[in-house]
Image (cartoon, rainbow, N blue to C red):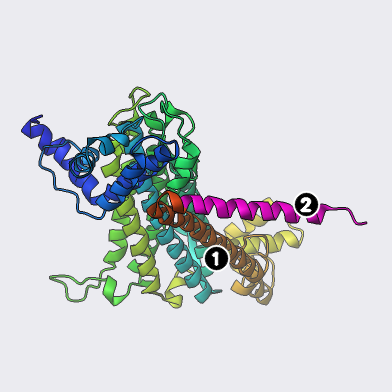
Amino acid sequence: MRWHAVYRRFVLGRHYRFAREALVPHFFDALTAYAMELARLGLPRADTAVTALQELRTLPLPSFTGEVEDVFFSIYSQLAEHWGEEVAGAIRRGLSRNDLDLTAFRAYLRDRVVALLGDFLRLRGAVLQVAETHAGVPLVLRTHHRPAQPSTLDHYLLGVEALLERDFRRLQQALDTLDRCPLGASALAGNPYPVDRRRLAALLGFAGPVENTLDAVASGDYALELASALAGLGTSLSRFLTDLLALAERGAFVVGEGLAQGSSFMPQKRNPVVLEHARIYAGQLVGGMGTLASLNHNTPFTDLNDHSTGVLEPLTALLGSAEAALELTRVALEESQFEPALLLEELSPEVLASEAVDLLVRKGVPLAEAYRRVQGALPGVRPELLGVEREELIAWMSLEGFFARREVLGGVGPKARAEAMARARKRLKEDRKALAALRARVRLARRLLAKGPEGFQAEEGEKATDQQGQVEGQEHQEEPLG
């Protein structure tokens, strides 16, 4: 078929080039797994198709010429040319591009999200490391853009890490939705052959299948959920970066030499541009949510390009922006330094005025009266207007006293901060372990898929033996004592 030049340029050629660059291994994985399942069912030539696919994937895929419309038909035509129509036709029994494409798309996005979670863990680790290095370093925090109360740098950074951890959880939840396999759904009603969809999912390293076959090809919420999680991450990072820029503005955060740029005109300038660029990428994450929502909005619940091929390039761009934002923020923390003296630049008696109120209340003054007295003693919180001794007021309003009185859960007290750091470290360790397990599952599936049916059958046999041994061990343990 001769495609129109405009359609070739903006649709077929563009999609083919993207798939050739990013999706080909995932298409071969899905086709190989499907051929293995047909071979298990005894369908003719399916076993030969497995071998053919394993050989063909070692060869470069032809560039787009317009002779075939997409990567699937490019693979199919090469199978037909080198192994014959019967072998090529074997893999098309019960297979639709609907379930095949979405399987490849989800596998590709899963890999990208798993890599991004690794970047995310490195940033969280860097935040905690900087917090530990600066444990107990005091600073003044603001509310409503005005100096409010003292805190410590590690207490502030532990708060930031807690926010980022929730973003990490949201990204994990999006991955849980994404990590489901559509293969075997066929066009939308299910495969006409009795394929084991759970087995297909396992062959491809997915957590399981998308259960409903229409849902498998019609749902676009996996992309929407991922974009939403990335938008939340972008929002959180932008807030942290804005704080760092504010500190950099007054010299309290000095960006490393390799991350700052000078001016073409003003020789004195040393601009903390790495933070600006990180915030640009974070802003792109926020903006991307609208694109993905639009691709799902007002579309019928069935297989469509809007929420299948349509989401790939926007999501790929968002995942690239997320990687850049996370990595730039991480190196900015690792390669820069805080200036403790300038962190306390806004320290004054006024930011400890609430302590003077508390002191009076503890002495029996009604709270409303204590509040009025302290307001009347400003600026400077003058002790003669409060009716307390100067030495007592100075001791009570010291930073050490302020921190020591705040040993509540999550507070700025030294013990509370140390306990919070230990909990954060434990959560980070558990998240690293969980991500390593997920990576191992996908790697194992690909290794077994490369071995063909024999590798997967051997693995199933080993699992069955292990499970039988565990059951026998449990039965032995549960025998009553004689």
Crowd tier of the residue under label 1, counting other residues whose Cα lies within 10 Å: few below 14, some 14–19, many 20 or above: many
Left or right: residue 199 versus residue 238 is: right
Rendered-image quadrant of the N terminus = top left
Query: Residue 69, can we see it?
Result: yes
Residue type (three-letter) at the residue carrying disc 2: Glu
Q: What amino acid is at disc 1? A: His
Could you tell whether 359 is left or right of 87 in the image?
right
Q: Nearer the viewer, residue 459 or 223?
A: 459
Comes first in the chain, label 1 or label 2 = 1
In this view, the residue in front, 476 or 397, is 476
Q: Which residues are magenta?
A: 456-482
State yes or no: residue 286 in magenta.
Answer: no
For image coordinates 28% across by 71% down, the residue present is 259
> Would you identify the image quadrant in which residue 380 lies?
bottom right
- Can residue 317 be seen here? The reply is no
Of the pair 439 and 82, the residue shown nearer to us: 82
Q: Residue at coordinates 34% horizontally, 22% vertically from top-left?
A: 300
The secondary structure type at the circle numbered 2 is helix
Per the rendering, the mark at residue 475 is 2
Q: Could you say where residue 212 lies in the image, as x and y percent from the top left?
A: 47, 29
Q: Is residue 327 left or right of residue 419?
A: left
Q: Quadrant of the C terminus?
A: bottom right
**Image quadrant in which you'd find residue 251:** bottom left
Which residue does the image show at 41% across and 30% down from the upper left? 185
Residue labelled with disc 1: 155
Q: Which percent across, then down, holds residue 397?
A: 62, 70
Q: Alpha carbon of mark 1 to alpha carbon of mark 2: how far?
A: 51 Å
Of residues 44 and 200, the one nearer the viewer is: 44
Secondary structure under badge 1? helix
Q: Main secondary structure of the magenta part?
A: helix
